[in-house]
Amino acid sequence: MHRHPLIRHPLRGLILIVVIICFVFVLQNFSTQDNEATTTEEIHSEDLCDTMTLAQAKEIAKMSEECQSAGVFQFENTEMNFCNNHTHTWQFILTNVTEPLCGAACYVHTKTSKAELQWMCTGALIEEE
């Protein structure tokens, strides 16, 4: 610190002001992050995946001939219909599928609004006697 009192006191005051401004800035950033987190939590719901609603995804899945011909949708069973935020898809598990030893799911991509059928087969063979 400077030894001359006429310079030392204003310099201390300036340092104190800079510290206070930095402290206020940090507090404002934490406050903004808390508000953004709350807003994000409010936006996400069981009926919304990215920007596509469950109702929109159901309509797209119903229009897919590939998915319709593979099995039966169980739209009323919410455990079989869900959003996968990592793949950005609505996933609808089909029952009574047409392929033996297989399961199937209809995936509706939220970014492209296209439906895609995916088979989940075990590969096990049943021996007939």
Image (cartoon, grey):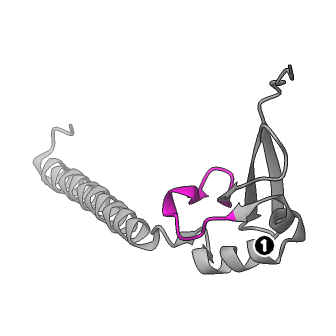
Q: Position of residue 61 (x, y in %)?
A: 75, 71
The residue tagged 1 is: 113
Whether residue 29 sits left or right of residue 62 in the image: it is left
Quarter holding residue 128: top right
Tag 1: amino acid: Ser
Quarter holding residue 101: top right
Whether residue 113 sits left or right of residue 86 in the image: it is right
> Residue at the spot x=82%, y=78% of the render?
63
Question: Label 1 neighbourhood size at 10 Å, few (<14), some (14-19), many (20+)?
Answer: some
> Residue at the spot x=43%, y=67% of the render?
40
Q: Position of residue 8 (x, y in %)?
A: 16, 47
Q: How many numbered marks does the figure carry?
A: 1
Q: Closest to the observer: 110 or 5? A: 110
Q: Position of residue 75 (x, y in %)?
A: 59, 69
Q: Secondary structure at mark 1?
A: loop
> Residue at the spot x=38%, y=62% of the render?
37
Q: Closest to the observer: 24 or 55? A: 55
Q: Does residue 8 lie above or below 77 as drawn?
A: above
The answer to if 126 sits in the magenta stretch is no
Whether residue 20 sits left or right of residue 9 in the image: it is right
Q: Position of residue 66 (x, y in %)?
A: 88, 64
Extreme residue in the front direction: 129
Which part of the image, by quadrant, shows the C terminus? top right
Whether residue 3 sits left or right of residue 88 in the image: it is left
Span colored in magenta: 73-91
Q: Closest to the observer: 114 or 26? A: 114
Q: Does residue 97 lie above or below 41 as drawn?
A: above
Which part of the image, by quadrant, shows the N terminus? top left
> Residue at the spot x=75%, y=64% of the render?
109
